[in-house]
Amino acid sequence: MSQRIKPTEAELEILQILWEQGPSTVRAVNERLRERREVGYTTTLKLMQIMAEKGLVDRDTSQRTHVYRAAVGEEETQRALLRRFMDVAFRGSATRLVMQLLGGGQTTPEELQAIKEMIERAERREGEKGDGGRE
Amino acid sequence: MSQRIKPTEAELEILQILWEQGPSTVRAVNERLRERREVGYTTTLKLMQIMAEKGLVDRDTSQRTHVYRAAVGEEETQRALLRRFMDVAFRGSATRLVMQLLGGGQTTPEELQAIKEMIERAERREGEKGDGGRE
DNA sequence: ATCTTTTTACGAAAAATTTCGTAAAAAAGC
DNA sequence: GCTTTTTTACGAAATTTTTCGTAAAAAGAT
């Protein structure tokens, strides 16, 4: 299901902006992109039009200036991307991935602490499995 | 430095095979690829030739049948890929990435345990850093 | 020796992704 | 009203990645 979500890198960059600042015009998105690198306005426009075709974004065309919003959830997308990335880069091993993350010095002590707490929570969830905790 | 390592997806697939089974001929790599999908022999050959040009692999051409081996380390490459992926998909946040990994039900209890141990080790390392710890 | 198979080299086609030029429509400014 | 600016639509060029056809060389088989 969510395996159909496969934005390209440029598309993901735009999704990030839409997730972060909510529904936006092409101009607003392009300006954010420009903070990081040179991008032509029509380049951004075209990409967003393609994304609309693919169903990655919805757009409100009731006004002349269209407003786009992400049509796929941030978490859902991250889950799909992570699954794929873990498979291709770490042969599917979550352990190796985390090992690299922690060993590679890419985490602050605060992040380590936060991650540790998450592990404990995840362990508790595992332990309870079966009694149907619903959402 | 290691930011120069940027294999494409098909290239990464080949690197995985070379890392896993060591120096290999084009035929051997192609056969492994074929276990998962249709790939022509010359397609694999060409890719590996390009990889040799890029410096991703080395090859021994002393025999008629060339033998290729990975010229970039598995960990080094994973580190570079992970850094990039974390930035683009998780806005640079290791915490969010791990959250998704643990919350997404993509980890077995065994992996959880292994990960927890790694965290503790990483914490000890961090702790030593500040007060000039003994090794 | 001749024919077949295996391998490399090379180039280019095919596919996917990214970029942008140009035009037309709508809105805004004067 | 007329000009300038902003926006969308569209198509195509440019770039990157993947795939494969063809040829030539080397090795092996008969």
Image: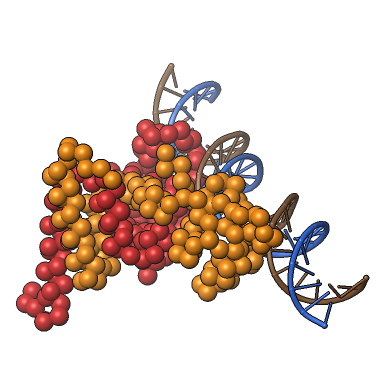
Chain colours: A orange, B red, C blue, D brown
Farthest left residue?
B134
* Residue occupying image coordinates x 14% and y 43%: A128
Would residue A37 be found to the left or right of residue C11 on screen?
left
* Residue occupying image coordinates x 37% and y 61%: B90
Q: Toward the viewer: A1 or A85?
A: A1
Q: Toward the viewer: A31 or D17?
A: A31
Q: Which picture quadrant has residue A98? A: bottom left
* Residue occupying image coordinates x 49% and y 58%: A15
Q: How many marks?
A: 0
* Residue occupying image coordinates x 42% and y 43%: A2
Compared with B95, A122 (above or below) is above
Q: Toward the viewer: B122 or B77?
A: B122
Where residue B108 sits in the image (x, y, percent)? 20, 44
The answer to whether residue A4 is visible is: yes
Would residue C1 be found to the left or right of residue B20 on screen?
right
Where residue D4 sits in the image (x, y, percent)? 80, 77
Q: Toward the viewer: D29 or A36?
A: A36
Would residue B98 be found to the left or right of residue C1 on screen?
left
Compared with A64, D25 (above or below) is above
Where residue A90 sits in the image (x, y, percent)? 30, 50
Name the image quarter holding the N terminus of chain B: bottom left
Name the image quarter holding the C terminus of chain B: bottom left
Q: Which picture quadrant has residue C23? A: bottom right
Would residue A122 be found to the left or right of residue B9 on screen?
left
Compared with A98, A34 (above or below) is below
The answer to whether residue B73 is visible is: no
Compared with B123, B51 (above or below) is above
